[in-house]
Image (cartoon, grey):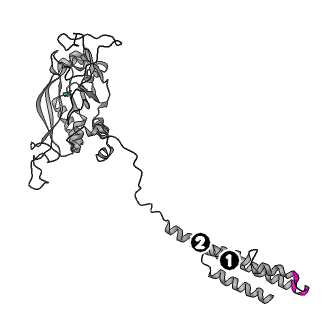
Amino acid sequence: MLDQITELQEAGLRAVAAATTTDALEELRVGLLGRKAELPNLLRGVRDLPPDQRGPAGKAANEARQAIQSAIDERVATVAAAELDVRLRAERVDVTLPGRPEPVGGLHLLTRVRRQIEDVFLGLGFDVVEGPETETVHHNFDALNHAPNHPARDPGDTFYLAPSTVLPPLPAAAGAPTTADGGPLTRLLRTHTSPMQVRIMEREDPPVAVIVPGRVYRPDSDATHTPQFHQVEGLWIDVDITLADLKGVLLSFARAIFGEEREIRLRPHFFPFTEPSVEIDVSCHLCGGTGHRTDVAGHPRCGLCKGTGWIEILGSGMVDPNVLTAVGRPAYDPERVQGFAFGMGIERIAMLRYGLDDLRPLYENDLRLLGQLA
Ligand code: PHE
């Protein structure tokens, strides 16, 4: 029996040494030492041996079992470490690769452009304020020096609100548009952000430097007009504010939005509430102000600025003394303070910046299109 034990031990140790996986070693453990294995069987047969052989045989069988057990334990430790190595190498994560986050949505182009505009003026020391979208005819037209028969007041150009049964009545200027039966029209959806010029001066003393982003409404609808759109108004009132300040501020704005190379020019214009009034053109960012696409073969005429090298971006001017007077506060005595105002369309700035020729898709919210305007 001793020979048999030695043979089993040696065969077992050889098999353990040859095993290369933890799975194989587990199989060997069951096969060599498990309940049905040969060695434990031999051990059970020890009690049938003559008494003088039991001791040495039992001892040898026990030692053989322990030898195999510890050989398996050692081998498992080695093989498991090797297996872990292989796995770590196979599953290695390259932490330097850029992440692939799920798209989580983003801000609408118009929101982003509004914020860019706000950032520029915040940097120049302007505050950002908002105002009501339903306005009084007084703030939208009268106080802004529009004559009672000014064409912009026509109900074809302005959304009037039906006379209110809840809000207190307001006085109406003689000669201004009325309801079909001659009733007063005193409230409307603001047609521009300019009424906030008046509201700010009504409630705050000079100096004031604010911009007013917000929705405005006009009954227009085509590729470049929607009945609701967005403007940013600007107002700076102090002593000694001049047209040169206006030009400096708007040059900074144009360069921040359209590129450091841009120039601006002031073109005479007319608005009822500024005098003098100017339209601001920025040199074309597509052709560098040359009117020709030097970056395209044959140098064709630039389609964006129509070959002029200039693009109109906003209306502005020095606040008309009549507007300061209409505020009705001594702090805005036109002999003492003056300033400038400007108003721009956010859609227009966005279309110019992103080369869009139709603004309606901006309101259709097709993410396949909006996602491209990053
Ligand atoms: N409110 C004018 C418009 O909507 C723009 C403007 C604002 C012009 C301020 C001059 C000064 O066209």
Above or below, comparing residue 374 to residue 41 in the picture: above
In the picture as drawn, the residue positioned furthest to the bottom comes out as 3
**Residue at 82%, 82% in the rendered image:** 59
x, y percent for residue 275: 14, 24
Whether the residue under disc 1 has CB within 8 Å of ligand 1: no
**Numbered badge on residue 81:** 2
Few, some or many C-alpha atoms within 10 Å of disc 2 (few <14, some 14-19, many ≥20)?
few
- Point out the quarter of the image occupied by ligand 1: top left
To which residue does mark 1 refer?
Answer: 28
Magenta highlight range: 47-54
Q: Residue 220 falls in which quadrant of the image? A: top left
Q: In the image, is 129 to the left or to the right of 87?
A: left
Q: Disc 1 or disc 2, which is closer to the eye?
A: 1
Q: Is residue 70 visible?
A: yes
**Residue at 34%, 12% in the rendered image:** 165
Q: Secondary structure at mark 2?
A: helix
Query: Magenta segment, principal secondary structure?
Result: helix
Label 1 to label 2: alpha-carbon separation: 19 Å
x, y percent for residue 238: 24, 25
x, y percent for residue 114: 29, 36
| Quadrant of the drawing holding the N terminus | bottom right
Above or below, comparing residue 203 to residue 290 in the picture: above
- Amino acid residing under circle 1: Leu
x, y percent for residue 330: 25, 15
Q: In this view of the protein, which residue sits in the foreground, 122 or 131?
A: 131
- Amino acid residing under circle 2: Ala
